[in-house]
Image (spheres, rainbow, N blue to C red):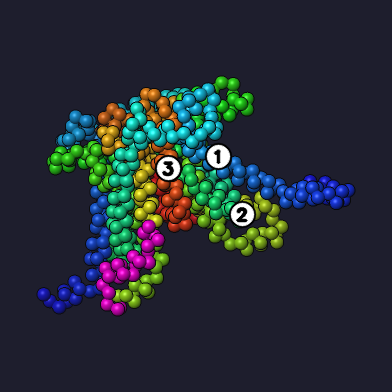
Amino acid sequence: MGDNVRRGRNTSSSSEQLNLIERLARSITWPRFIFAVTLTFFICSILFPFYWMVSSSFKSYAEIGGRHPVYVPSALRLDAYRELFDPSDPNFQNFGRNILNSVKVAVPTAVIAVILSTLGAYAVARLRFRGKGVLVNGILLVYLFPAVLLIIPLFAVFSQIGMKLGFSVQDNIPVLIITYLAQTIPVALYMLANYFRTIPAEIEQAGLIDGCSRMGVIWRITLPLSVPALVSVAIYTFMIAWNEFLYALVFLNSRSMFTMPIKINTIFNSPSPQPHVVMAASTVMTVPVVILFLALERFLEKGLTAGGVKG
Amino acid sequence: MKRGQLSRWDSLEARESRLAWLLTSPTALIVFGLIIFPAIFSIWISFHDVTLRNLNDVFHAPFVGWKNYVRVVNDFAFKFQNFRQWGAAVTSVVYSFASTFLTVLIGLLAALLLNKPFRGRGATRAIFLFPYVAPIVSVAFVWRWILDPRPSGVLNDVLMRLGLIGAPKAYLATRGLALLIVIVFEAWRYFPFAMLMILARLQAIDKTLYEAASVDGAGGWHKFRFITLSELRYVLGAVFLLRLIWTFNKFDDIFLLTGGGFGTNVLPVLTYQFSFGAYNFGKGAANAMILLSILLVFLLVYVRTVMRSTD
């Protein structure tokens, strides 16, 4: 290929256009070509589902139900969003309530998980105590047990306790939060312990020598130095609770208590299919997560590899 | 109090140890109460007749020995019948291995793409993580909407326009094809995890190895085969194992995509159907224990063969 181009330059070297083609042809080598094609394929197959989700959410009922798919919606129609949020719509879904439920579950989960795992992670990273090995290995076990295995005994035990104390297992947000803590604390503890180990111990020892207690050192030295890690762990655990499906499916029973994933599942499985409404609800649920992730990508990536979203 | 006792009680080591217990006790309580205890309790449930009737009095449930296990193994949804009806046990194994293999392969390809600097690498890397970060409910339903069996489904429309298929296909409602699609979905959603882990290792490979190989006259393929792959050996093994465990335990993906129908029923979904569809918790727990045993056999074989051979 390069040979042809060089010959071409010899015959009509003055042509400006050929110069451009020549430069292009020279820069395109086989490896680069394969690289570009593969990269394009990757990006398209990743982004197309997201494009399809957002664009479908702006389609009208006619565009959704037509004989052929509509690749670009004719206008930014808000029919689907009106159905989700506008009380005057005949098919009003009251999705705002489901968003609120998700927030009510995800925010306490994140806050409690960060507080408890900060304490635990500090002890694991800095202090020597008996039973540390058992604790750390016990935490790793959560990676091995499937959620469906744990949910049966949890359901049985909580209904037993609930009967004794007079609360219902189902539609009980605190119960759901407690089960989410079991899923988020191990990951949070693992991430934070790794972070605390990167803080030089000398700084803390200086504080101890100056007369601070251990708790004083944690509060005045370690925590202020760990703000980025704490924020990313909080967001991370928030995302796990926000996305969780199985436990919410089992523990939530009445429509008014549904979190977003369960509500979307219900809309999807309703007798009259309304894909545009499902896509609008999915968009509402996905956009905050993706924006949070992009804003904090640098911190969160560490979490993705360190702990993994168990799943 | 004697002096000796006082000083031991008050020594730095003892104080640190007490503080460590104080700090870790909430975490330990959650880990043991919500992970270890339920895991043990589910063994107990699997040997007892627990249904919705006696759920409130679960500790007095009648002991039934191996009956639950026998009923699971003889269930037509569980056992292998013929090459058309695989049953959940065989499907689970095939599905987990195939999708883990594909996930790691695509993750490796993506990591190689992003390993060398190019313009827009940071943004591309962020986009590559989208499938992993987005809520499972959203992405599963977008896929279902793209794979819609009507002629107006996007994939049907595109393939029909290209002349690749004559009539619209019901991708998620065709035996064989549905399993294939679910495997592809897993790879699409989870390759970013493999990519991040592999990329971190790739960037740590000593560049002088490649230079030395070039001096020795090694070509691109040889360098990849004998340097890159051999340096990645451990991380590839670790990623494969982690993803295999998680895929084997995964409930959400298949439940949302096919509901376990059309030859895609796997053990976690079957566990859910036994426990929360038929409300036979004993049978569900027995199924979950079988799932866990298969997983433990994997781990044992893996540790004894793969890890020994790489040492």
> What's under tag 2, amino acid-wise?
Arg
**CA–CA distance between discs 3 and 1?**
18 Å
Label 3 or label 1, whichever comes before in sequence order: 1
Q: Is residue A263 visible?
A: no
Residue at the limit of the structure toward the right, as seen here: A11
Check disc 3 and report the residue beneath it: A286
**Where, by quadrant of the figure, is residue B116 drawn?**
bottom right
- Chain letter for mark 3, please: A
Check disc 1 and report the residue beneath it: A45
Q: Which element carries disc 1, helix, strand or loop? A: helix
Disc 1: CA contacts within 10 A as few (<14), some (14-19) or many (>=20): few
Q: Which element carries disc 3, helix, strand or loop? A: helix
Give the residue drawn at x 48%, y 38%.
Answer: A54
Q: Which element carries disc 2, helix, strand or loop? A: loop
Q: Nearer the viewer, residue A305 or B212?
A: A305
> What's under tag 3, amino acid-wise?
Thr
Check disc 2 and report the residue beneath it: B119
In the image, which disc is placed on residue B224?
none
Q: Is residue A225 magenta?
A: yes
**CA–CA distance between discs 2 and 3?**
27 Å
> Quick one: quadrant of the N terminus of chain B?
bottom left
Q: Is residue A45 magenta?
A: no
Relative vertical location of residue A246 with respect to residue A300 in this rendering, above or below = above
Give the residue drawn at x 37%, y 47%.
Answer: A240
Relative vertical location of residue B59 with respect to residue A3 in this rendering, above or below = above
Q: Give how far across and how far down residue A287 sits, in percent.
A: 43, 44
Q: Is residue B160 visible?
A: yes
Q: Are marks 2 and 3 on the same chain?
A: no
In magenta, the rendered stretch is A209-231
Of the two numbered discs 3 and 1 in the rendering, the one whose residue sits closer to the viewer: 3
Give the residue drawn at x 22%, y 74%.
Answer: B11
